[in-house]
Image (tube, helix red, strand yellow):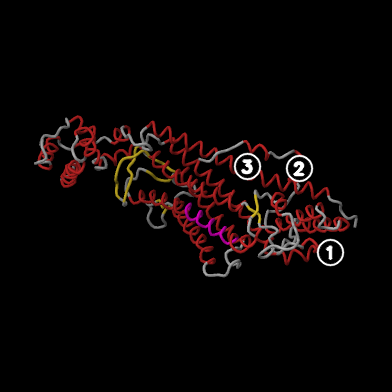
Amino acid sequence: MLKTTVSALALIISTQAVTAFAQQTGPRDEFFWLGEINKATTVINSEEGLLDKSMVPRITSGISKVLKDGNQPGGKRPARVIEFEPLLIEAAGVEVTLLHAGRSSQDMHATMRAAIMREDMLRLASQLNKTSGTVVKLAERHANTIVPNYTNGVAAQPNSYGHYLLGYAAGLDRDAQRIREAYTRLDRSPMGTTVLNGSSWPLNRNRMADYLGFSNIVDNAYDAGQIASVDYPVEAGSIVTSIALHTGSYIEDIMTQYAQPRPWMLLQEGGGNTYVSSAMPQKRNPGLLNSARQNASTAITLAMGPILQAHNIPPGMMDPKDAKTNSAMINSAIKVLQNWDTILNALVISPERALEELNSDWTASQELADVLMRKYKFPFRAGHHFASEIVDYAKTNNIKPSEFPYSEAKRIYAEALKGHGNDELPMSEEEFRATLNPLAIIKNRATVGGPQPAEMVRMLKAAKQGLAQQDAWIKERQARINSSLAKLDQDFDKLPKSNK
C-alpha cells in the first residue's frame, strides 16, 4: 500500500513562490519548457561562473521578451530548439547561444517531453482516482444489493453488486500503482547529457533537475536520450491499455442487460445516456455505453502506436517520441475514465428485479454441494452431481428453485448417490430451501475477500484509504513541480536585466 510521509510538508509553496508562479501564463507545452530550460541554464551558469556575468542582463532580457511575446494571443510558440533559438538571437543577439554550451537539442527535447508526459500522467492519475472514488461510493451504496454475476456470458452465482464493483476498484488500484511506478522512472531529468555521452562543459545536472521539478537525473547519458525517452511512451501506452480494458470489460457487462426484455440494470434514460431508435419506438439505445466503448477502443489503438513506432528502429530515433501524439494517447485514457464516471452516475439498479432473476434460475445450486460437503462430509463431486441432476430436472420441467418439490429432491438424491452410503437426503426441507436463498448465500460466505458484510466493511475501508493516499501522492508530486518552477522564476527575476 502506498505510504505517505511528512515529506509532503517540505513541498508547501511559500507565499512569495506562489506569487512568482502565478505570474506564469500560457500552457505548459514545448515552448513553455524550452523557456524554463533556458531560464534555469542562465541562473545556474551565471552563478557557477560558466557564463560571463556581463552577458547576463542581455540574455535574461532576451529570454523574457521571447516568452512574453509567445504568451500573447497569436504569439510564436515554437516546439523545437532549432526554431526557438532564432527568436532568442533576434531578441538578445548571437551571444545568447553561449547558453547552448553543454546542451543539445536532443537532451533539451528529451527533457521537455519528459516534463510534459510527467504532468499528463498526473492528470491521468487524478481522473483515475476520481473515477475509482465513484466506483467505491457505488460499491458502498450497493454492498447489500444481491445480483447475478456471470461467467462465460452465463448467469453463474449470486453476488453483492458492491463486491463486484470492489473487484473493479482493485483493478483500477493496480492501474494507479502502475502510474506511480512509471512516474518514478519518468521523473528523472535528461538535461545536460547533450547527445550521447555528455560534453566537456560541466553543466550542473542536479540543479537543472531541481529547478525543473524533477526528483532526480537519468544517470547514464546514453540512456537519457537514446533508451529511456523511448521507454516512457511505451510504458504509458501499457497503462492506457490496462485502463481501457478495464473500462471495456465493465461496459460489456452492462450491455448484456440491454438484450433482456426485463433488465435489472440500465442507464437513466435521456440526458445523453440513451436515445430513441429512429425506426423502432420501443428501443432506447445505450448511446453512452456505445461511445464509451468506442473511446476505449480508440485509446487502445493509440496506445499501440509507441510500440509499433519503437519496433526495429536504431536507438534514439524520433518515431515514438512526439509529445503531442503521446499526450493525445494519455488524454484518450482520461476521456475513457470520464465516460466511465458518467456511466456509474447514470446507473439505475433494481434490487428487486435482480433478486427475481436470481430466484428464477439456479445460480445458487452450487451451495447444495457446498453444504453437503461442509456440514455432512459428502465429497464435493458427489454433491455437485446431485445438484446438477436437480437443475436438469427443474429446467426440463420449468420449475423455479423456490417451487422445487422437496420429495423430488429426496428421490434425485437417493438415485444420484446410490452406492455412496446413506441414500437419505440429510437436509430437511427447511434447510434445503434456505440453502437455495441467494441472500443467505452472500451472508454466510466465509472467504477472506468475499461479499459477506464484515469483509465488505473491511474492503471498503481499505479502498477509501487507498484513494486518500493516492490523492495525497498526486498533490505532493504536482506541488513539487509547481514549487520548483516558482523558485526558478524567483531566481531568474533576481538576475539583472538590460535597460535596452
For the residues labelled 2 and 1, say whether their Cβ atoms are less than 8 Å apart: no
Considering depth in this image, is 255 or 136 the residue closer to the camera? 136
**Distance of mark 2 from mark 1, alpha carbons?**
31 Å
Magenta part of the chain = 229-243
Q: Say which residue appears at 75% left-offset and 55% top-offset.
A: 71
Say above or below: 393 vs 320: above
Comparing 124 with 134, the one in front is 124
Residue 109 horizontal side relative to residue 48, left or right: left
Q: Is the residue marked by circle 1 packed among few (<14), some (14-19), or many (20+) residues within 10 Å? A: few
Task: Find the distance from the CA under tag 2 to the CA under tag 3.
Answer: 19 Å
Q: Position of residue 87 (x, y in %)?
A: 78, 64
Q: Amino acid under label 2? A: Thr
Q: Of marks 2 and 1, which one's residue comes earlier in the chain?
A: 2
Mark whose residue sits in front, 2 or 3: 3
The spot of residue 57 in percent (x, y) is: 86, 55
Q: Which residue is mark 1?
A: 95
Label 2 sits on residue:
19
Residue 257 is a magenta residue: no
In the rendered view, tell whether residue 374 sits above or below residue 328.
above
Residue occupying the point 65% across, 48% down: 215
* Side of 385 where 348 appears, left or right: right
Callout 1 amino acid: Glu
Q: In terms of secondary structure, where does tag 1 sit?
A: helix
Please tell me which of labels 2 and 3 falls first in the chain.
2
Residue 202's image quarter? bottom right
Q: Which mark is residue 165?
A: none
Three-letter amino acid code at the position of disc 3: Glu
User: Which is more N-terminal, label 3 or label 1?
Assistant: 1
Q: Rate crowding at label 2 as few (under 14), some (14 to 19) or many (20 or more) other CA atoms within 10 Å.
A: some
Query: Which sits in the foreground, 310 or 165?
Result: 310
Residue picked out by circle 3: 476
